[in-house]
Image: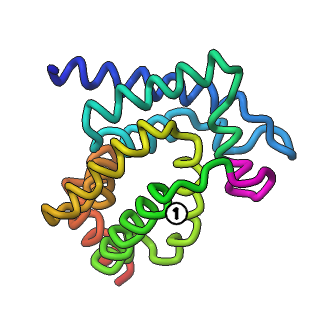
Amino acid sequence: MSADTRQQLIEEIIGQELEMFLAVKNRGGTASCQEQPDSFRIMRHMTHAVMPIEYLESYLGDLKQAVLDNRNLMTEKYALMEGLIPVQNDSQAITELVQIESDWRKEVSAQFPLSVHPDGHESFCSYLNGELQTYSPKTLIIYLNYARKTQYKGGNLVRDRYEILMRKLGYDSLAHCEESLAGSKK
């Protein structure tokens, strides 16, 4: 698959997610983050850009099926995070993925505490758990297998995501961002 095709797939996923995100009905009206679709696109791009094609195709299928089933996966994710609906999927794959990603995030925040603040760890895990509960069993297994493989090879998807984010924000790298933030605190 070409890089252009991969990018088109990611853009289609983000487009589907953004439609769902903008349709979320918040208790207090429109949330401020819903008024910043470009930020949403950046964050979702960093999430998906590190994932294999097999995952992207499967997750896009999940999104399309959700539309057919009249489900808003973003509404479900946020409701799960806030405890407004019961657990939808108690798969062991979710538990393992949250643990792997949690360990990765702790590693990154220990190395780059100004760029990836350690205090955000609990909300990171809650967000990921809620999101993973909206995935199909097929997508979960693809994600878990990829995470295990990445972990086995000594990789870190959280770091890879933050490297993408920092480049989108104008830094050369995560290390460059950390240096800039450290310099501004002096």
Asked where in the image residue 96 lies, by quadrant, the reply is bottom left
Q: Nearer the viewer, residue 21 or 169?
A: 21
- Residue 81 is a magenta residue: yes
The residue drawn where x is 25% and y is 61% is: 156
Residue occupied by mark 1: 124
Q: Crowding at label 1, few (<14), some or many (≥20) Cα neighbours within 10 Å?
A: some
Give the side of residue 136 with respect to residue 161, left or right. Answer: right
Relative to 74, residue 105 above or below: below
Residue extending farthest right: 28
The region drawn magenta spans 78-87
Residue at x 32% of width, y 56% of height: 162
41 with respect to 48 (left or right): right
Q: Within the magenta stretch, is there residue 96?
A: no
Residue at 53% over, 19% down: 64
Residue drawn at the location 26% of the way across and 31% of the way down? 53
Asked if residue 162 is positioned above or below residue 11 in the image, the reply reads below
